[in-house]
Image (cartoon, rainbow, N blue to C red):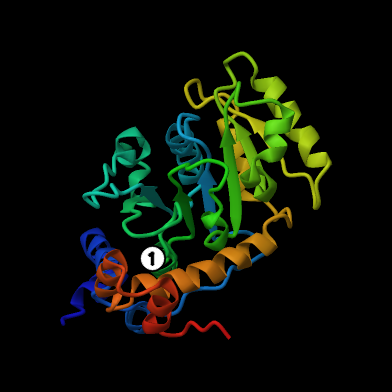
């Protein structure tokens, strides 16, 4: 297999970059093979983040808000790559991959050379973020993109897979999303390094932000910043971009991050097993049990 596209991607060719990410996504090339040509993933030069997960429930305006944040960061001269994760159909395996239509920054001729946008389907992944995103993130960092933002599908309170992938977690909320008790119940909020209450032009936004701040004061670790924004009117977006750029870790997601990485490691072994389709057929027929299927995949033991 020719790897010229890797060299071309290293030299800045966008089409070759897309081909490289597709090869990683389709597993036609392994991460280690690609990094042998592209070079190592750089360590963070300071205590700041290289990867940022932006997540939240559907309808809170994540994509439009992210568009404003990207514009602000690109104006500072930063090179930012975005991996936008879309849910795949459980029946067909297809995905809409429509987040780009909300991104005006990629059409700005003065800024678009500093922004790279890629949609990713969840495919077989059980969580909201497919495990392959981690490899794609490393490729982008190795190619010189300074920051990688992972926009997740927003599956609700149980969405914590992003913790396994990102240095920082930002949760986007909206007004009228529940009272303080709901905020405390939301597991994702407990992991947040920052919260952006979007649609601040609507009634209830300030109240909801205060309720979230109060719930954080009862938790463990430092209290994350809670900022009000309106992606529609641009209110508070530049300030939020500045806050997020220098965002420290709240220390809330360390344990969950390693838990999710452990789960992702085992998930990858299952999904990448060449025996998977055959084992699924046998499970469906009832000819084997789950314990036997796990043993046949290898690396799993009941002992």
Q: Name the one closer to the observer, 171 or 292.
A: 292
Please tell me in which quadrant of the rendered image residue 280 appears.
bottom left
The x, y position of residue 139, in whole percent, is: 39, 69
Residue matched to label 1 = 132
Q: Is residue 132 left or right of residue 77?
A: left
Q: Is residue 235 left or right of residue 179?
A: left
When the figure is inspected, residue 146 is found, relative to residue 27, above or below; the finding is above
The x, y position of residue 98, in whole percent, is: 29, 39
Please tell me in which quadrant of the rendered image residue 216 appears.
top right
Quadrant location of the C terminus in the rendered image: bottom right
What residue is rendered at 23% in x and 71% in y? 8
Furthest-left residue in this view:
1
What residue is rendered at 67% in x and 49% in y? 193
| Label 1 element class | helix
The x, y position of residue 112, in whole percent, is: 34, 45
Residue 6 visible in the displayed image: yes
Q: Name the one closer to the observer, 153 or 31.
A: 153
When the figure is inspected, residue 1 is found, relative to residue 192, above or below; the finding is below
Furthest-front residue in this view:
286
Quadrant location of the N terminus in the rendered image: bottom left
What residue is rendered at 45% in x and 55% in y? 127
The x, y position of residue 21, in whole percent, is: 29, 64
Mark 1, other Cα within 10 Å: few <14 / some 14–19 / many ≥20: some
């Amino acid at each position: 297999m020719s790897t010229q596209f890797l060299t071309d991607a290293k030299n800045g060719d966008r089409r070759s970059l897309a081909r490289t990410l597709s090869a990683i996504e389709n597993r036609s090339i392994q991460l280690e093979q690609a990094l042998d040509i592209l070079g190592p993933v750089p360590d963070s030069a300071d205590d700041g983040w290289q990867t940022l997960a932006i997540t939240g429930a559907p309808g809170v305006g994540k994509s439009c808000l992210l568009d404003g944040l990207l514009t602000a960061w690109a104006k500072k001269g930063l090179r930012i790559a975005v991996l936008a994760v879309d849910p795949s159909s459980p029946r067909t395996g297809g995905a809409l991959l429509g987040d780009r239509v909300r991104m005006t920054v990629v059409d700005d001729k003065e800024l678009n050379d500093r922004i790279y946008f890629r949609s990713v389907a969840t495919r077989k992944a059980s969580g909201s973020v497919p495990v392959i995103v981690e490899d794609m993130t490393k490729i982008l960092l190795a190619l010189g993109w300074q920051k990688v933002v992972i926009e997740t599908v927003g599956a609700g309170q149980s969405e914590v897979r992003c913790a396994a992938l990102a240095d920082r977690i930002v949760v986007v909320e909206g007004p009228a999303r529940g009272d303080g008790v709901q905020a405390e119940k939301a597991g994702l909020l407990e992991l947040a390094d920052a919260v952006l209450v979007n649609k601040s032009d609507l009634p209830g936004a300030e109240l909801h932000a205060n309720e979230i701040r109060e719930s954080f004061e009862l938790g463990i670790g430092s209290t994350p910043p809670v900022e009000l924004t309106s992606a529609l009117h641009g209110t508070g977006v530049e300030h939020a971009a500045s806050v997020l750029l220098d965002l420290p870790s709240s220390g809330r997601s360390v344990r969950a991050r390693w838990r999710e990485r452990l789960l992702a490691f085992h998930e990858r072994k299952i999904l990448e097993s060449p025996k998977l389709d055959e084992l699924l057929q046998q499970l469906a027929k009832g000819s084997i049990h789950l314990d036997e299927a796990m043993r046949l995949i290898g690396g799993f033991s009941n002992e």
